[in-house]
Image (cartoon, rainbow, N blue to C red):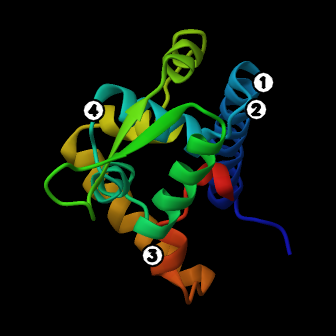
Amino acid sequence: MALTPQAATVLRQFRVVFNAIKTHFQRIESQSGLGGAQLWALSIVSRHAGTEVGALAHAMDIHQSTASNLVRALVKKGLIRSARDEEDRRVVHLHATPEGEALLANTHGPFAGLLPDALQRLDLDTLTRLHTDLGQLIVQLGVEEVGVAAQTPLADL
């Protein structure tokens, strides 16, 4: 069955978007040796020294366990360090190491990724239309696990 001209045009637009995202992630991974989500997490920790895992998860709009996994990988690579809070030992503060800062300085962003950066620059009316229209597309796709998929970083797809 052939696509209608309108459906074919929109499909081509999705291809352009997906290709731009894929190319961006390949470029930053080539520059930094990190996946997109790891680089974004490192950039947040660098900008907000002392942040906690929960705040990192919130900033990236991902599940806290996903943020914990990113932190664990970055600590293992020596790009961030974690320090327990003096008063509440359950709280862990995150800091970029000098190696992490150097890596960021030598990598071209946007660190949050191409799509989050572009979405952030759209006006409210456009975002509202996209939200509504993509919601209809998600229904047509028959996605059952919207919550899980919605909190998975694009770089991990």
- Of 60 and 136, nearer the camera is 60
Spatial separation of the CA atoms under disc 3 and disc 1: 36 Å
Q: How many marks?
A: 4
- Above or below — where is 104 with respect to 4? above
Give SS at disc 4.
Answer: loop
Q: Please tell me whether mark 3 or mark 1 is closer to you in this view.
A: 1
Residue 40: which disc? Answer: none
Percent position (x, y) of residue 12? 71, 46
Question: Which of the 4 quarters of the picture holds residue 106?
Answer: top right
Q: Residues within 10 Å of mark 3 (few under 14, many from 20)?
A: few
Percent position (x, y) of residue 123? 23, 38
**Residue at 56 percent of width and 42 percent of height:** 75
Q: Which residue is mark 3?
A: 136
Question: Which of the 4 quarters of the picture holds residue 4?
Answer: bottom right
Question: Which of the 4 quarters of the picture holds residue 16?
Answer: top right
- Of 27 and 87, nearer the camera is 87
Q: Residues within 10 Å of mark 2 (few under 14, many from 20)?
A: some
**Residue at 72 percent of width and 19 percent of height:** 31
Percent position (x, y) of residue 157? 69, 59
**Residue at 86 percent of width and 75 percent of height:** 1
Pick whichever of labels 3 and 4 is earlier in the sequence. 4
What amino acid is at disc 2?
Answer: Gln
In the image as oriented, which residue stretches furthest toward the left?
87
Spatial separation of the CA atoms under disc 3 and disc 4: 37 Å
What amino acid is at disc 3?
Answer: Gln
Q: Which residue is mark 2?
A: 26
Q: Please tell me whether mark 3 or mark 4 is closer to you in this view.
A: 4
Q: Which residue is mark 1?
A: 30
What amino acid is at disc 4?
Answer: His
Q: Which residue is mark 4?
A: 48
